[in-house]
Image: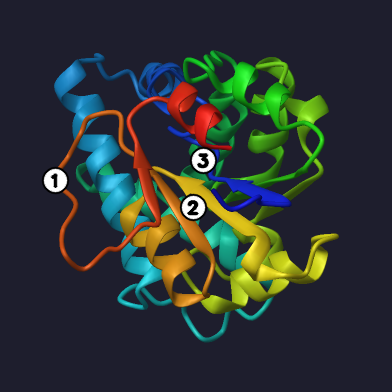
Amino acid sequence: MKKYETVIFDLDDTLIDNHESIKYAFKVVLRVLDINYSDILLNKWKSHDTKYWHSWETGELNVPRYITKLEDKITYLRANRFIRFFKVLDLSFEDAVSLNDIYCNNLGVNIVEVKGANDLLSSINNREIVIATNGPKDAAINKLEKANLNSYISLLVSSEEVGHSKPNSEFFDYMIYRCDNKNKDNMLLVGDGLSTDILGGMNNNIDTCFYNPNNIVIPNTYKPTMSVNKLKKLKRRL
């Protein structure tokens, strides 16, 4: 088994149970809007959010050309997803920005680690451990701290600081630039996203481990180096 000097982890739904975080933050947003919560509405939001960011990652969703600063682009993208989801409310851009702030501030309140995350990270703590996330950086830092995982992390790279998200090569070029180890042959990327983590690793010549807790059938398009349905199984391999 190859000895990996750098192990790169996606954060949400790989090390952190993102469902509980999203559920709490979404409930707060609904209270502000005076809308009753339901699991059906939550699932619609999660589906919308996933498709929305995938559209941006694949270039189907564009930011208006007059928005040139990275910070303004991020603000626009985050606010626009609320405008689209709650379109019947005809939200103003300012109201959508406010809702996004409320949502992001509450994402880090109810933090639950994926089972085995702490044990896995402690077992490889002598290696370079990197977080590569398409989520907000401040929220990622907060999640790691509240889950008591932050002490294991050597580096955190988020799409908002790069200006590009996984699976784009620009994200990985920046990440490698920030890593102590520059040798991609000694890197392993672990994540639950086929179109972000696994494809990103494949396109950038980095070995990948697909975290597959639901045991989904992997389409032929994706060729992870390995696949596990529990983090403790990855611990054995590392």
Coordinates of residue 18 in the picture (x, y in percent):
44, 27
Query: Which colouring convention does the figure follow?
Result: rainbow
Residue type pointed to by label 2: Arg
- Judge by depth and name the residue closer to the eye, 213 or 111: 213
Q: Which mark is residue 78?
A: 2
Badge 2 crowding class, 10 Å Cα cut-off, few under 14, some 14 to 19, many 20 or more, is many
Q: CA distance from mark 1 to mark 2?
A: 31 Å
Query: Please, is residue 172 above or below residue 232 in the view?
Result: below
Q: Which mark is residue 133?
A: none
Residue type pointed to by label 3: Asn
- The earlier-in-sequence mark between 1 and 2 is 2
Name the element at disc 3.
Answer: helix
Q: CA distance from mark 3 to mark 2?
A: 6 Å
Q: Is residue 213 left or right of residue 12?
A: left
- The earlier-in-sequence mark between 3 and 2 is 2
Coordinates of residue 168 in the picture (x, y in percent):
50, 74
